[in-house]
Image (cartoon, grey):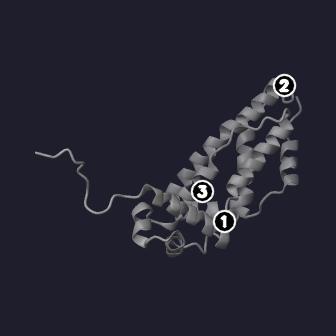
Amino acid sequence: MVDDEVVRGRGRPRDERLGEKILDATRALIDEVGYHQTTMDAIAAHAGVGKASLYRRWPTKAAVITDAVAADLAAPPAPDTGSVGGDALGYLRDLRHALTLLGGPSVVAGALAERGEAGQLELREILRAWNEPAAEVLRRGISRSELPADLPIDVIVDSWTGYLIYQIVLVRVVPSDDDLRRLVGLLPAG
């Protein structure tokens, strides 16, 4: 017969706050020394935890870094400035920021590359979430007659994402606001 006491595993109960402490330390380290100089040892030391606590939660540096920046990679709502040009520029700035988090282009690219196929799937899922705000910007432009009714929304959204991924992740150059304005300028008039 079991008492009314809660039966739990051996050892101390897991401190859920510790995970957030580790993620905060990871973000701080990436900001200070960059992706490549951030190590599991450094994360553990910066968080003030043992390496075992870190490895129980994340098996690799790429895994903990991906989790540390995941919230910052979430797509925000579509900007609404009153014009398709302003909305598109705001969206592209937001996406540029997300792809250059915490120390530049190498952070997201490095974490996802080290995770191999799993990292590529994560990047696809992250970017898929960003498609809807971009599509909303374009649909709003169509409804305000700023863009043609037959605009290929999916093609435009993919071209914006492709341009930023190519520049930031592959070429490792962060497009300037002027570059983003030129990209928005390619939209056809309604």
Q: Which residue is mark 2?
A: 144
Residue 4: x and y in percent read 20, 44
The residue carrying mark 3 is: 69
Residue 140 position by quadrant? top right
Please tell me which of labels 3 and 2 falls first in the chain.
3
Label 1 residue SS: helix
For badge 1, the amino acid type reads Ser
Residue 30 left/right relative to 176: left
Can residue 115 be seen by looking at this rendering?
no
Tag 2's secondary structure? loop
Q: Position of residue 71 (x, y in %)?
A: 59, 50
Amino acid type, callout 2: Arg
Q: Quadrant of residue 184?
A: top right
State the mark number for residue 106. 1
Proximity of marks 1 and 3: CB atoms separated by less than 8 Å: no
- Circle 1 crowding by C-alpha within 10 Å: few under 14, some 14–19, many from 20: many
Q: Residue at x 60, y 63 (%)?
A: 27
